[in-house]
Amino acid sequence: ALSAGQKRTHPAHIPGHFPEFPDPHTYIKTPTFREPVSDYQVVREKAATQRRDVERALTRFMAKTGETQSLFKDDITAFPLIAARPSTIPYLSALLPSELELQTLEETDSSEQDDQTDNENTTGNIINDDPGADKENSMLPPSGGVPSTKSSEDNVIDNPYLRPVKKPKVRRKK
Amino acid sequence: MNRKKDKGFESPRPFKLTHQVVCINNVNFQRKSVIGFVELTIFPTVVNLNRIKLNSKQCRIYRVRVNELEAPFIYNDPTLEVCHNESKQRNLNYFSSAYAAAVSAVDPDAGHGELIIKVPSELWKQGDDLKVLKVYIEFSLDQPKGGLHFVVPDVEGSMAERGAHVFSFGYQNSTRFWFPCVDSYSELCTWKLEFTVDASMVAVSCGDLVETIYTHDMRKKTFHYVLPIPTAAPNISLSVGPFEILVDPYMHEVTHFCLPQLLPLLKHTMSYLHEIFEFYEEILTCRYPYSCFKTVFVDEAYVEVSSYASMSIFSTNLLHSAMIIDQTPQTRRCLAQALAQQFFGCFISRMTWADEWVLKGISGYIYGLYLKKTFGVNEYRHWIKEELDTIVDYELKMGGVLLHPIFSGVKEKDNPTPHLHFSVKHPHTLSWEYYKMFQCKAHLVMRLIENRISMEFMLQVFNKLLSLASTASSQKYQSHMWSQMLVSTHAFLKSISNVSGKDIGPVIKQWVDQSAVVKFFGSFAFNRKRNVLELEIRQDYTSSGTQKYVGPIKVTVQELDGSFNHTLQIEENSLKHDIPCHSKSRRNKKKKIPLMNGEEVDMDLSAMDADSPLLWIRIDPDMSILRKVEFEQADFMWQYQLRYERDVVAQEESISALEKFPTPASRLALTDILEQEQCFYKVRMQACFCLSRIANSMVSTWQGPPAMKSLFTRMFCCKSCPNIVKTNNFINFQSYFLQKTMPVAMALLRDVQNLCPKDVLNFILDLIKYNDNRKNKFSDNYYRADLIEALTNSLTPAISINNEVRTVDNLNADVRLILEEITRYLNMEKLLPSFRNTITVRYKTNCALFSNYFHNRLIRQLFSRLIKYLFSP
């Protein structure tokens, strides 16, 4: 039989009639793993498909377990729409950002978005100074800047709506 | 002209109101009712005042007392039954005149009212020394149909937990709907307002909150407001609800209110208000007239903005977070409008309905100045053009809008606006659409006056009006100064002539005293021998909604040697105008071409007519006439105008004109504009749609990929994989708006079979598939809504002969894909709603297209359900 290298001998506590240790190459390990996909196109493709699958699965599940409306008479299972249920306070869900969005906002606030800025600054001294659009950019962010002085001044603010409600005057009993 | 020449204001009433108390003791959300009383302090101006006419609608009146004496009263509201069982004449004309008569019969500006109180005879004799009368009226209001609006969500919990609230609303003078008063803009008085509401609620009203006191059982509290500035009843308002309170961090006298849970949005939305305050105070060189200001955001508001003395009520839908792009400028516009109306409309009121145009004009005009400063000159000019087009289209279609109706008063038949199906004599007989156009025209006319006398003088006039009013407002009633707070057309014009020394008579005569707009047709020929431009300007003044214009008109001619302004006189019978040209047609010299703004540019002149030095011609470039111009010039001239004229209005005009010239040269000019980053984004958005229409007209000769596709790929897709769009980053708003618009316009492309090209559809589906907003600072809800709109645009409505019903089986594959996407989007929105449910709303607005495609009733039923979902309860 083929053998490679020196086999280990038995330590003292192992009796001699025991079989020999296997060849040393038995103990050699070469960890292998699949190369992570780093191709941009594939990553995007994957992310898109994954999101779509999740969304489809979720909406289908919701549609199947709840009431639905359908676009077609002949096959009501074809494009199931989750039934529209009137909400009692519709403006809340419509105006408040979802937790998901808030989370995104926090993440992106810290990480600068700069990958696309280079092509914005392609200046040519040509055409139309465009004050309108520039201004619009500068006016939106940053978000709701409440001045830092506010918290310290809070107690000083004299606003009638913040004043305590007065107790009624006790009328003299007649 | 019988414009009032007298200086002062003559009250139509035999008494003068000086002070009014409004006390609402109980607001019942369960029953939607309120109970309270009012007390009016009046000074008779005649001896033997025996009748007092007040306004009141839908209120139940329990008792009336004058100076502690019970007084008999008659209550009659003729508008409740307009036609009195008239059975013979069941037509609109009859109704219209009967309704106008009913409104006149109770018109407070004529001294009338629904409520007639007999003054007890004991008080008549005191008439000699014109003693004060105190009129005390107890009333209640049950399930009001106007004036006050109750919002009571149908959920568990106390009224405060449910977010129940109530607010006043109404078109023009509608305060009589919720308490008895003199419901006229010209009857000013000081106010004391008291509202007792549940302890968990806040009552917001006009004036200063002096104190809040618990009732004895501690379950309710009373808000005491005092408004020392003389104010007309229509400018009084109220809102009660479990509001969250935000004191403006920049201005502590300004307080904002919103419904529970919306405080973070309120903070963000209001972080900008102080800049608008500063702007107006600076241009008007006048402090904000009231000592405090309140904004309240309510649900189910009928209009987005309504302004009252020292407070404004807004729709809660204007609130937004920092992630929302499209809503932000819109909300800021609404805030600016509200604030402009605080100065002109609330603080300064009007004498009569005929003077309304001055107030609407001034507030609209200073709002325009704000737009110019904040959003830039391009946005401002774009807005003016938009407004001008709107009013011109309306008047040409529906007939003229008259800003200053003068009624000789005697004959009803002297109708200054016979083309309308309603009377313009009262605000309440107008159509809503007409009133909107009225406001639009009013601010445009103010701009025309500004053109005539300069902005400095304009602002001086406003300042004068404001300072007169604020002096008057601090006076006691007895000094008879309060009428200085009322503006009249006459006083306004007089002030203009005093300040500027200029005669604006022709402007007023043409646009204020007269309705209708001007319609020009222009064409030209170049006379080479004389080196003269022969311009012909014709007018149509016979069609409905048109009038004849005589006077100066500016024409700008761009020649090879530069841009030249000419002022022509439009006269009775002269159509032709000779304009001498400055440059000979010598294009061989390679020379830069000077533009109007002093810039010099290189142009490729090969498209030009070799014999003519004319590049383009513009009629009335500054929009100083309310007009429509149809001008004929060659396609290459429009193309030059689009590429090289720097004015956004000129660019937009040339885009509209180029639709008629589907040629490769037009295509190139539009594509160049699309790529031009310095160009105003709204012009580029308009160019997208024009390009898709041109592409459709050129379908048989179109070369290359579908219009805009390669451009979009270059601008917004990844360099390494051009079929995948970059992850969203909307930090540059110009390109965001372009990114949103291009797919919508592309989806309108059609091939020779009149179908949306396969390329385009797949392209849009890919945009949806690869849309990735995870790294974006802004929400992509409007972008996704536009993608949905693009999908619906890509469907060509089927021409069906036998009205066949489409079924799942006979759907083609493309339609299946589209439906699949839309279903998924709609379902996702129900699970994770987007801002203002943009996507569902957009889908709904496209429903007509959809149902055309499917001939499917079911789809329409779905929409009605969706509408219920969106606007419930």
Image: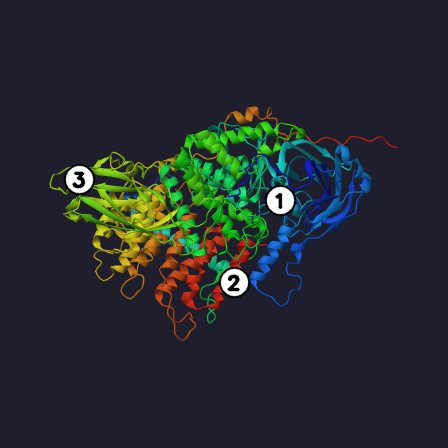
Locate residue B131, reporting x and y percent: 76, 33
Locate residue A33, reporting x and y percent: 31, 47
Pointer 1: what residue? B109
Work out whether residue A140 or residue A9 is closer to the camera in this orientation and state it.
A140
The reply to whether callout 3 and callout 1 are in contact (CB within 8 Å) is no
Pointer 2: what residue? A68
The kind of residue tagged 3 is: Ser
| Mark 1: few/some/many CA within 10 Å (<14, 14-19, 20+) | many
Element type where label 2 sits in the image:
strand
The kind of residue tagged 2 is: Thr
The image quadrant where one finds the C terminus of chain B is: bottom right
Element type where label 3 sits in the image:
loop
The kind of residue tagged 1 is: Asp
Q: Distance between the residues labelled 2 and 3?
A: 73 Å
Locate residue B86, reporting x and y percent: 64, 64
The answer to whether residue B148 is left or right of residue B856 is right
Nearer to us: label 2 or label 3: 3
Pointer 3: what residue? B583
Would residue B85 be seen by someone viewing this image from the given angle?
yes
The answer to whether residue A168 is left or right of residue B227 is right
